[in-house]
Image (cartoon, grey):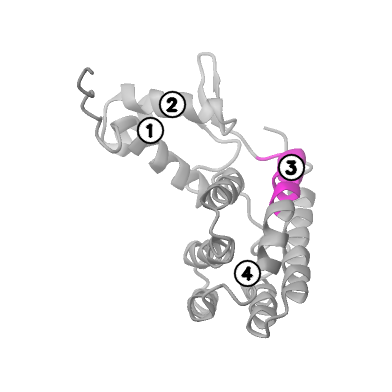
Amino acid sequence: MSALEPIAAPQTLASHARSAVLAAIGDGRLEPGSLHSVAQLAAQLGVSRTPVREALLMLEREGRVRFERNRGVRVLAPTAHDIAEVFELRRLLEVPSTASAAGRVDLDALQAELDGMSRAAEAADEAAFMDHDERFHALIVAASGNRRLVAAVAALRDAVRGRGASTVGRSRSLQEIQAEHAAILDALRAGDGDRAAAAMRYHLARTGDLLAARYGAIRP
């Protein structure tokens, strides 16, 4: 049997560039609808144009940016249809996962994330808040023991968060979002899977509906 080929580095420059651009889209530094040149982005990242172009081609295949001839690359805003698709799938996956998490999920870890949301809300730190939010949901899904389910939900979250979609400061406050998570944790702490699932269903439906309403009028 022939020897295995050496594996590549964990992340290539293009992968690093993709992550950096995606993070900038997610936190609003690269706004939906804005136009950028490959050279400009490469200069900001401190790398050559080639890995940045490769990264942008990856993001174009994912529907996050669009190359425009002789103009550059445009950051695409999510559409109401995009939002609806993502949250329909999240409800199908996360609601039953939440029901089954009762009696299985690490309640102390969930409380730690909820406390982190509270601190971030007080500091008006949306990025930190959403990191705790993401880990809160991930803990619940991970209680299923299904790694593919965890990966699928993470990809769905990334599809929206990685495009700068947010309801914060427009449709509701960080404190309101935290309260929706608190209701989920209260039900899980009581061991009531049905109530926890209902709270998760409400949270996801409200988030999806508010985002869809916000982005329905936006055109890439």
The residue that label 4 is drawn on is 101
Q: How many C-alpha atoms fall within 10 Å of the one at disc 4: few (<14), some, or many (≥20)?
A: many
Comes first in the chain, label 2 or label 4:
2
Q: Earlier in the sequence, mark 1 or mark 3?
A: 1
Q: Nearer the viewer, mark 1 or mark 3?
A: 3
Name the N-terminal-most of marks 3 and 2. 2
Q: Nearer the viewer, residue 71 or 102?
A: 102
Report how far apart the C-alphas of labels 4 and 3 lie in the structure.
24 Å
Residue 25 position in % (x across, y down): 51, 44
Residue appearing at x 68%, y 81% in the figure = 191
Residue at 40% in and 41% down = 19
How far is the residue under mark 2 from the one under mark 4?
46 Å
Residue denoted by label 2: 37
Q: State the separation of the CA atoms marked 1 and 3.
A: 30 Å
Q: Which residue is outermost to the bottom?
A: 190
Q: Looking at the image, do the residues carrying marks 2 and 1 touch, with CB atoms under 8 Å apart?
A: yes
In the rendered image, which residue does mark 1 sit on? 41
To which residue does mark 3 refer?
A: 85
Which comes before the other along the chain, label 4 or label 1? 1
Specify few, some or many for label 1: CA neighbours under 10 Å numbering under 14, 14-19, or 20 or more: some
**Distance between mark 3 and mark 2 Cα atoms:** 30 Å
Q: Nearer the viewer, residue 104 or 49?
A: 104
Residue 11 percent location from the top left of the image: 30, 37
